Amino acid sequence: MSDNKRYYWLKLMDDFFTSKRIKKLRKLAGGDTYTIIYFKMQLISLSHGGFIEYTGLEKEFYKEVALDIDEEEENVKVTIQYLLSCGLLQTTDEIEYSLPFVQNNLGSETASTQRSRKSRNIAQEVLQCNTDATACNKLQQKCNVDIDIDIDTDIEKDTDIEKEKDIDLKELSSETKPNYSLIVDLYNQTCTSLPHCSKLTEARKKLIRCRLEDYSEGDLLKAFELAEASDFLSGRNGKWTGASIDWILNVNNIQKILEGNYKNKKAIDNKIDWSKV
């Protein structure tokens, strides 16, 4: 059976701690604690594309985050206030919060991709050790162990390697690179009641690329159509106006949209003919 587990990582830039916003955060009383809280918030957002959703489990967003990351509520509150004030945390509806740094520095791969990369690295080492018989023998033993493990744990190893190899090469091949402009055009042409997407940022490219790993372009169009048809998501009922292309392409939101969670409820006819009462 194929291994569908996915691993995520966050690239930390070499100027992270020398940036003015982080230096100012650390200079606050308790700044090191606030910096750790900021890191924890980034980590819990990794599997959601750099977003943290306020579910309403607690009365306030900061209390829900504090519960999630096991930190003191007051410290989390101060951290969130600072992050919002300097743009390290953003929200338009106080329901969905985005961390731009995460969205610009997020990476992920499946377990089978990890195995494929490891196998390719070992194969490369084999080619380079022809002049060292001892090293080759040790490497061959290592290869044999890895092959035995892969056979035991993954019957469809060869098929998965070829499939994941294609995924690895997506960014290197212009022929398989996602058509970002097409997705944006589909959104703008379909979701006329929602905010217009005027700029194709790197964060949005990553959102589109991540969603196309699990959904087809047709699925994305269907989600746009359902969002536009929804009185709630389109804001036609006046209750909420926070939907956008970023919100729709969030990993949690698109699935709920496609499952029909935001379809309009049929009105119940409560009219009574009082002449017959």
Image (spheres, helix red, strand yellow):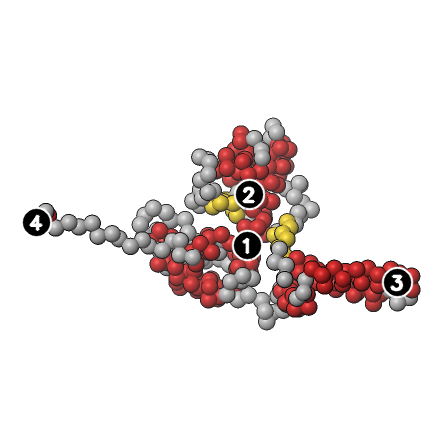
Can you tell which mark lies on residue 203? 1
Which of pointers 3 and 4 indicates the residue nearer the eye?
Answer: 4
Query: Label 4 amino acid?
Result: Ser
Q: Which residue is mark 4?
A: 275
Q: Earlier in the sequence, mark 3 or mark 1?
A: 3
Q: Is residue 54 above or below residue 166?
A: above
SS at mark 4? Answer: helix
Q: Residues within 10 Å of mark 3 (few under 14, many from 20)?
A: few
Which image quadrant is residue 126 in? bottom right
The Cα–Cα distance between marks 2 and 3, rounded to whole angstroms, is 51 Å
Q: Marks 4 and 2: CB-CB under 8 Å?
A: no
Which of pointers 4 and 2 indicates the residue nearer the eye?
Answer: 4
> Residue at point 35% right, 58% down?
229
Is residue 188 visible from the viewing direction of this image?
no
Residue sticking out furthest to the front: 152
Q: Which residue is mark 3?
A: 137
Query: Label 3 amino acid?
Result: Asn
Residue sticking out furthest to the left: 275
> Residue at point 55% right, 54% down?
203
Q: Nearer the viewer, residue 2 or 56?
A: 2
Is residue 249 visible from the viewing direction of this image?
yes
Query: Label 1 amino acid?
Result: Ala
Instruction: State the image coordinates of residue 141 (x, y, percent, origin top left).
Output: 84, 61
Please give left or right for residue 198 compared with residue 169 in the image: left
